[in-house]
Amino acid sequence: MSAFEAISTNLPKGLGQQWTGPIASSSMSAERTPEVAPKGDDQASFLRAMVRRLGGDADAPDAGTHKGLVAVAARRLVSDAFVEPLLREARESSQPGGMFAPGAGEKRFGHLVDRAMADRVVDAHRFDVVEAVERSLLQRVTGETPAPPITRLEPGLTA
């Protein structure tokens, strides 16, 4: 008897058996009730859950709307794609050496500090790129035509 045969023939009961068909009716309950959706399981609660997943405030008044979700998604995109890489590059290029070199904790968790700072920078300042991404995403989500771009210059100031 080979080692493989010894292992395959001495398996504990229930292991190594292959499923051969439908589950026996004795194992299924006959009085099965249909599952009811939990209370509040509508589109607004779904949008609030998405806002929470993206790191936004799910209790905000507009969190249950498309506009609220798009605003959070636009801020997250700008934070992750533009601001965080700049902060990471600045942190990595300006690290001192010798006795003041970053420790294991700074090396391991520096990216979390970069993310938190990037989120705060994007939330504190209203960047034009965030507004442009919001308009573009809102157009894709709702199908509405975009509003004209917001310019910060008054018409009399242009040359």
Image (cartoon, rainbow, N blue to C red):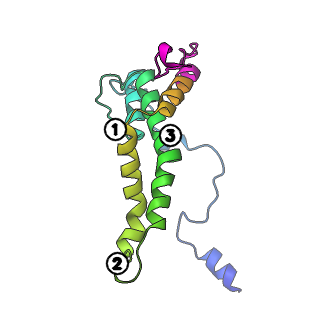
Residue 9 in sight: yes
> Who comes first in sequence, dot 3 or dot 1?
3
**Residue at horizontal 37 percent and vertical 57 percent from the top:** 113
Tag 2 secondary structure: helix
Q: Which of marks 2 and 3 is in front?
A: 2
In the image, the segment drawn in magenta is 138-159
Q: Mark 3 = which residue?
A: 77
Residue type marked 2:
Phe
Q: Is the magenta stretch mostly helix, strand or loop?
A: loop
Q: In which quarter of the image is the N terminus?
A: bottom right
Task: Residue 55: name its quadrant.
Answer: top left
Please say if 130 is above or below 94.
above
On residue 133, which mark appears?
A: none
Distance in Å between CA atoms under marks 2 and 3: 34 Å
Q: Residues within 10 Å of mark 1 (few under 14, many from 20)?
A: few
Q: Which amino acid does label 1 sit on?
A: Ala
Give the residue at mark 1: 124
The tag on residue 100 is 2
Q: Residues within 10 Å of mark 2 (few under 14, many from 20)?
A: few
For the residues labelled 3 and 1, the Cα–Cα distance comes to 15 Å
Residue 62: x percent and y percent? Answer: 35, 22
Q: Nearer the viewer, residue 91 or 141?
A: 91
Relative depth, front residue between 47 and 153: 153
Name which residue lies at 48% across and 32% down: 130
- On screen, residue 128 above or below 100: above
Disc 3 residue type?
A: Leu
| Rendered image quadrant of residue 146 | top right
Judge from the rendering whether residue 121 lies leftward or rightward of residue 89; answer left or right: left
Image quarter where the C terminus lies is top right
Q: Do the residues labelled 3 and 1 touch (CB within 8 Å)?
A: no
Residue at 38% in and 77% down: 101
Residue 66: x %, y % from top left? 45, 22
